[in-house]
């Protein structure tokens, strides 16, 4: 499950709260509660965007409860601090770099270096600006958990927007179309690749295999969805998002990436509600 922001309607989102539910992916329910904070600093040729995210994920396992003690990781935690720097290079070129240390763990035995992953990316952005239309092309590379285990991936994005009316972004890891209906209402459609790579501190016992320390809970999939935003007053906006999540994998792996247990997930409809605070 992912979060999207309708930038055409909300120029600067300061804070957001979201609750999402992904039910019944083969005897497993997943719910998420998240809080996000954002701030931006502007200089002559440079902007710095700071983002902080805390997400608590709850798993409800209904199958094979005698085979493995799921209680060790029914609750996991995700904490990320992200900094994004955009620097103008002249002639409508920008250098965009990002660094995002992230913690993902069940925190059963407290914090350790195994709980942290360093996500990062760097890319070039070329822009073409017209009276009412803006076109951009971004290309680069990054390291993230889009497919579960952290790995380097290409980043490619083509974007076009028409004033504050609509925008289209095509690329990897996310594509979306945003339509502003009026001052209060906006809708968006999107498709995105996403994944999680969570350290399971403590011991995990699996029948016939034994006990494992520092195993990983690995998940990845593709989300399709629609989002509706309604501005209830100048600084507060509510969101309703629903779609279909194709969960390609949900596994417990050992430190050598051997599969200890495969939940054999299937796809499921999901729903998310949220509240955003923003300023112009």
Image: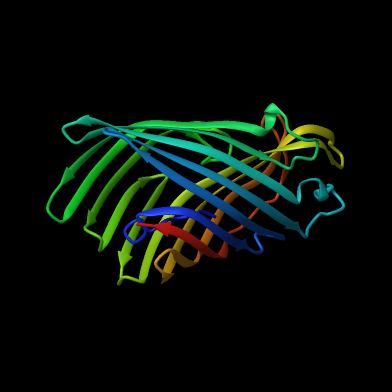
Q: Nearer the viewer, residue 220 or 178?
A: 178
**Residue 18 placement: quadrant:** bottom right
Residue 257: x and y in percent read 66, 31
Residue at 21%, 47% in the rendered image: 135
Q: Is residue 141 among what the camera can see?
A: no
Q: Determine whether, in the image, residue 144 is placed left or right of residue 155.
A: right
Furthest residue in direction left, as rendered: 131
**Is residue 100 rendered to the left or right of residue 79?**
left
Instruction: Give how far across and how far down residue 23 sits, in percent.
Output: 64, 64
In which quadrant will I find the N terminus? bottom right
How far across and how far down the image is residue 128, in percent? 17, 43
Query: From the viewer's perspective, is 20 left or right of 108?
Result: left
Residue 264, placed above or below residue 142: below
Foreground: 113 or 25?
A: 113
> Residue 256's image quarter?
top right
- Give left or right: position of 84 versus 95: right
Judge whether 181 appears above or below 89 on screen.
below
Q: Position of residue 80 (x, y in %)?
A: 57, 40
Describe the colour scheme in one phrase. rainbow
Please state which of residues 276 and 172 is positioned toward the viewer in this rendering: 276
Quarter of the picture containing the C terminus is: bottom left
Q: Residue at x 60, y 43 (%)?
A: 196
Up-down: is 105 above or below 223?
above
């Amino acid at each position: 499950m992912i979060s999207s922001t309708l930038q055409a309607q909300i120029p600067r989102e300061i804070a957001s709260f979201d609750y999402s539910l992904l039910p019944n992916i083969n005897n497993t329910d997943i719910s998420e509660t998240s809080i996000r904070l954002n701030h931006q600093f502007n200089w002559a040729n440079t902007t710095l965007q700071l983002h902080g995210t805390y997400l608590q994920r709850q798993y409800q396992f209904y199958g094979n409860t005698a085979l493995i003690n799921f209680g060790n990781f029914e609750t996991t935690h995700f904490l990320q601090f992200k900094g994004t720097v955009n620097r103008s290079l002249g002639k409508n070129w920008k250098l965009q770099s990002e660094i995002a240390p992230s913690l993902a763990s069940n925190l059963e035995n407290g914090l350790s270096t195994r709980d942290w992953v360093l996500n990062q990316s760097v890319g070039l952005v070329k822009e073409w600006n017209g009276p009412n239309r803006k076109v951009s092309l971004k290309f680069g590379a990054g390291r993230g958990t889009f497919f579960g285990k952290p790995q380097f991936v290409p980043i490619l994005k083509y974007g076009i927007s028409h004033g504050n009316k609509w925008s289209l972004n095509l690329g990897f890891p996310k594509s979306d179309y945003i339509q502003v209906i009026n001052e209060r209402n906006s809708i968006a459609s999107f498709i995105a690749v996403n994944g999680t790579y969570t350290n399971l501190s403590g011991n995990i016992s699996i029948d016939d295999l034994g006990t494992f320390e520092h195993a990983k809970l690995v998940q990845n999939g593709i989300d399709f969805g629609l989002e509706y935003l309604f501005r209830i007053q100048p600084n507060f906006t509510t969101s309703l998002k629903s779609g279909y999540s194709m969960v390609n994998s949900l596994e417990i792996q050992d430190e050598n990436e051997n599969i200890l247990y495969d939940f054999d997930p299937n796809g499921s409809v999901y729903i998310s509600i949220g509240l955003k605070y923003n300023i112009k």
